[in-house]
Each structure stands twice: as structure tokens, then as C-alpha cells.
Image (cartoon, rainbow, N blue to C red):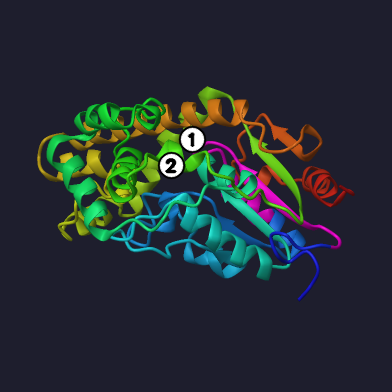
Amino acid sequence: MQAGRTEQGGGARRKLVIVAGPTASGKSALAMQLAQRLAGTVINADAMQCYRELRILTARPSLADEAAVPHALYGVRAATEPANAAWWRAAALGVMNAATMPILCGGTGMYLASLLRGIAEVPEIPAAARAEARHLVAEIGAPAVHAKLMAVDPETAGKLFAADSQRIARAWEVWRGTGHGLAYWQTRPAEKLAGWDVRMILLDPPRPDLRAAIETRFAAMLELGAIEEVKNLLALGLNPALPLLRAHGVPELGAFLRGEKTLTEAAAAAILVTYQYTKRQSTWFRHQALVDKSALHIIHARIDGSAQFSESFVDNLINFITQAG
């Protein structure tokens, strides 16, 4: 086996590129440019882009993009198979080891942190506990389950937003399925990523640019068929507590399809929740030291197309990536 191709491997460290930042900041376009120059594989690090049912609304790479450079972990899970950081970490490590130049691309900070810092190994959760958690969230709502969790596992509950249905369901199933809260398992020893020379490119565009990009992108999604995509997803009759059913735009366009909102109202609501999410993403990335400063390159601009990919711009990034670590 080639040296450095395992998480703990010895010998020369291999390069790992991370392109991170908030939604609609231009991560995918930049990752593709780097992949073309470095013979790289773009590896998904976005929780919602793992699912196959929503290509348009989750802004997954197009078929043309996937044909242009190798992509991995996009659209590989069914909506009925909730993804989590532990699954993604194991899958990402497998792709990284096989790729010539792995390029992680995404804005799910929890996934990136799990890869770089390690993740506590939670025992396998019984199916009954998982089903109970999702049923409970769907029946009484995430805030009510959060209140119940606060009574039995305040350490975990205190770290969660009351409206975060996905993480609250996960916390409840872990407590019910193991007898310990998620916070307990997170204190167990975790193995950090080793054997890799990590270079992180963080996009941190101005807020007005990001808001404008979200508006433009959502309008394009509607033209590409996002309404029909949501209609097909809802027709499956899935548990509303499943993560994909909470993807930005799904509840809002669902309300439009049921006649509860006009399309203008639904679009405005979807744009607002997406923008609010990008603010949380940007704040998280600014305050999390995932890599050393010498391994971090911040771009205070949105990447909006080929006009920005001047030879000098890309050359500077390539030099940053390939410099000795």
C-alpha cells in the first residue's frame, strides 16, 4: 500500500485540499477549476448534496460537471437513509485514499470537523430507537422533543437549537438507544486525521454579494424544475422528520404546492432561510480553527464564474496548495 494512504499512514504526507464556505459562495466552481489543474477528485462535504432525490434544489453538480472532472459522494444516499458525520467521514476517507488529489468541497462544518478532529464512535443505534426519534419529532415538533431531551440529557440539549429537527432527532435516538447522551459519547477519545498535508481555501464573500447570489440561484432553480422536483419528493410520502424534507426550499415550495403560499411568497421565504443559514455558516467557519493559519487561504469574494479564473488567480492557489508543508 502506498505510504500515507491510510489515516494513520507513515511516510510522506499526501495533499488534501478543502474548499469551504457558505452556501452560494462559489465553492463548486472553484473546486472544479482546481480539480482540472491538479487531476483531482471533487469530494462532497455538504450534508444535503449526499441525497439523490434533489439535484436541483441542493445545487448538486450537473451531469456535465460530473463528466468534466471526477466527483464523489454526490447523490449516493436515498432520502430514507439519513446521512451523518460518522458515515460521511468513513466514506470520505475511502475516496481520499483512492484519489490522486482529493478536493473536499462543501459547507457542512460538522462534517469537516469530524474528518479533521476525529469523531467519537457512537454504538450502533437500534432501528426502533431511530424510528421513535423521527416519529416523535414529526408528531410533537422539534422544540417539544428538545424540551424532553433537556430533562434527561441537559448536557447535549444545551448545545442544540430547539428548532434543529435533524440533530434533535439524532440526540434523542442516541439517548434512547444507548442509555447515554450524545455529549457523553463525544467525550470519548477520537482519532484525529493523520498522514495528510491539509490546505484549506475558505470563501468569505461580503453579505450583500451572497444575498444577491442566493436570489439569482433560487430563480434559476425554479426555471430548472425545482417545483416538480419537490412535488416528486413529497409524493413519496416520507417521514417529515427526515433531513432531506427540511432542505432549504422544500418546506416553502411544499407550502406553495398545497396552496398555502403564492410562488412569490414561497420563493421569498426560501431565500430568507437560506440567507440566514449562510450567516450561521460564515460565523462558524470564522470561529473554528480547523487548520493552522499557514494552511488557510481566505478569499473575501464570491466566486461567480470563469471571469475570475485568471491564470494568475489560479496559479496563486496552486502554489498555496503545492508548497511544502
Could you tell me which residue is drawn at 62 percent across and 40 percent down?
303
Query: Can you say whether 199 is above or below 94 in the image?
Result: above
Which quarter of the rendering shows the N terminus? Answer: bottom right
Q: Which residue is mark 1?
A: 213
Secondary element under disc 2, as helix, strand or loop, is: helix
Q: Nearer the viewer, residue 57 or 192?
A: 192
Give the amino acid at mark 1.
Ala
Locate residue 203: give its quadrant.
Answer: top right
In the displayed structure image, the side of residue 159 where residue 230 appears, left or right: left
Residue drawn at x 36%, y 42% is 180
The residue identified by callout 2 is: 217
Does the rendering let one see residue 68? yes
- Pointer 1: residues within 10 angstroms few (<14), some, or many (20+)? many
Judged from this view, the residue extending furthest toward the left is 259
How far across and down, in percent of the image, does residue 227 sit?
Answer: 25, 50
Q: Residues at badges 1 and 2 in contact (C-beta under 8 Å)?
A: yes
Q: Quadrant of the rendered structure where residue 83 is? A: bottom left
Whether 69 is drawn above or below 200: the answer is below
User: What is the C-alpha distance between the residues marked 1 and 2?
Assistant: 6 Å
- Residue 267 percent across, percent down from the top left: 29, 35
Segment tinted magenta in the rendering: 11-33
Q: Residue at x 75, y 46 (%)?
A: 199
Residue under the image location 69 percent in, 41 percent down? 201
Do we see residue 248 in this rendering?
Answer: no
- Say whether residue 12 is magenta: yes
From the top left corner, tell me how far across and down residue 171 is, in percent. 34, 41
- In the rendered structure, the answer to whether residue 194 lies left or right of residue 151 reads right
Q: What SS does tag 1 mark?
A: helix
Q: How many marks?
A: 2
**Looking at the rendering, which quadrant does residue 285 occupy?**
top right
